[in-house]
C-alpha cells in the first residue's frame, strides 16, 4: 500500500475513533444530566413535603387543645377571633372598612362575658384613651341602635356607661367602648361617627371574625 493509501486509512480510523469517543462522551453527559434531573426532582419533592409538614406543624401548635385557631396577632374567644388596633381612625365607617379588608367586621358584643373579654383586650393592648375602640353598633334613622348584622340592640345585652347613650349634640350615632380611663372597664358610649381634628388620639377598633376550622 502506498503512502497515500496509508494516510487515507489512518484518516478513516481517526475519524471513527473520534466519532466513537464523542458518542461515548455524549452518552455520559446524557446519563449525567438524567441523573442530575432525577436528583433535582427528588430534592424538589422533599422540599415540598417539608414545607407542607411545617405548615401542618404550625397549625397543630396553633390549635393545640382546640378545634380551630386564629391568625397571628388575633385573640381567640369562643368561636371568634378578635383583632385590636390602637389609635386607628377618626371615622367609624373607616374602622369598619379596615376590619372588612381583613375578612372580618367590627365586633358585635352579645354577652357580659364577651364584653369583659374585650375590656381585657383594651388592657392588653394599652388602649388608654377615653375614646377607646370602635365596635359594630350604630344608631339608625329611627333613633335606635342596631348591630351591623341588623340585630336591634333593644332588649339585648348592653353595657352603657352612666348617663349613656346621651346623643350629645344630636349627632352621636356610633358606639365605642371607652379605654382604661374608666372604672369599671368595658363601658360603652356613643360618639359622632366622624370625629373632628380636635379628637386625639383617635379611637382604636375591635374586629371580629369566625374562627378558622380545618
Image (spheres, rainbow, N blue to C red):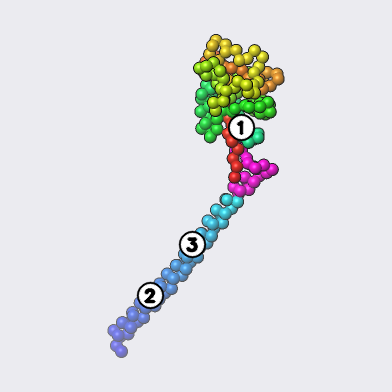
Residue mark closest to the camera, 3 vs 1: 1
Crowd band around label 1 with a 10 angstrom C-alpha radius: few (<14), some (14–19), many (20+) = many
Q: Depth-wise, is mark 2 or mark 3 nearer the camera?
A: 3
x%, y% of residue 109? 62, 26
Residue 191 rendering spot, x and y as whole percentages: 57, 17
Please, is residue 172 above or below residue 207 in the view? above
SS for callout 3: helix
Callout 2 secondary element: helix
Residue 178 visible in image? no
Q: Which residue is at a point 51% across and 32% down the rendered structure image?
A: 101
Q: Quadrant of the N terminus?
A: bottom left
- Could you tell me which secondary element the residue under label 1 belongs to? strand
- Is residue 118 a member of the stretch shown in magenta? no
Q: Earlier in the sequence, mark 2 or mark 3?
A: 2
Q: What range is drawn magenta here?
A: 54-74
Residue bearing the label numbered 1: 82
Q: Name the spot of residue 36 as percent of width and height, x first.
A: 50, 63
Seen in the picture, residue 54 relative to 131 is either above or below; the reply is below
Amino acid at each position: 500500500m502506498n503512502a497515500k493509501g496509508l494516510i487515507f486509512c489512518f484518516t478513516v480510523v481517526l475519524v471513527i475513533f473520534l466519532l466513537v469517543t464523542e458518542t461515548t462522551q455524549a452518552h455520559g453527559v446524557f446519563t449525567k444530566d438524567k441523573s442530575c434531573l432525577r436528583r433535582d426532582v427528588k430534592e424538589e419533592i422533599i422540599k415540598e413535603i417539608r414545607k407542607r409538614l411545617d405548615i401542618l406543624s404550625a397549625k397543630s401548635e396553633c390549635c393545640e387543645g382546640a378545634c380551630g385557631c386564629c391568625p397571628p396577632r388575633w385573640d381567640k374567644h369562643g368561636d371568634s377571633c378578635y383583632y385590636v388596633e390602637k389609635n386607628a381612625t377618626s371615622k367609624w365607617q373607616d374602622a369598619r372598612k379596615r376590619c372588612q379588608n381583613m375578612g372580618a367586621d367590627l365586633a358585635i358584643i352579645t354577652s357580659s362575658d364577651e364584653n369583659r373579654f374585650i375590656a381585657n383586650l383594651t388592657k392588653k393592648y394599652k388602649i388608654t384613651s377615653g375614646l377607646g375602640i370602635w365596635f359594630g353598633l350604630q344608631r339608625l334613622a329611627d333613633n335606635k341602635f342596631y348591630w351591623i348584622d341588623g340585630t336591634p340592640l333593644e332588649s339585648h345585652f348592653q353595657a352603657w356607661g352612666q348617663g349613656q347613650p346621651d346623643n350629645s349634640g344630636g349627632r352621636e350615632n356610633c358606639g365605642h367602648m371607652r379605654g382604661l380611663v374608666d372604672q369599671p372597664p368595658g363601658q360603652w358610649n356613643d360618639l359622632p361617627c366622624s370625629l373632628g381634628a380636635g379628637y386625639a388620639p383617635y379611637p382604636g377598633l375591635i374586629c371580629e371574625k369566625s374562627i378558622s376550622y380545618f
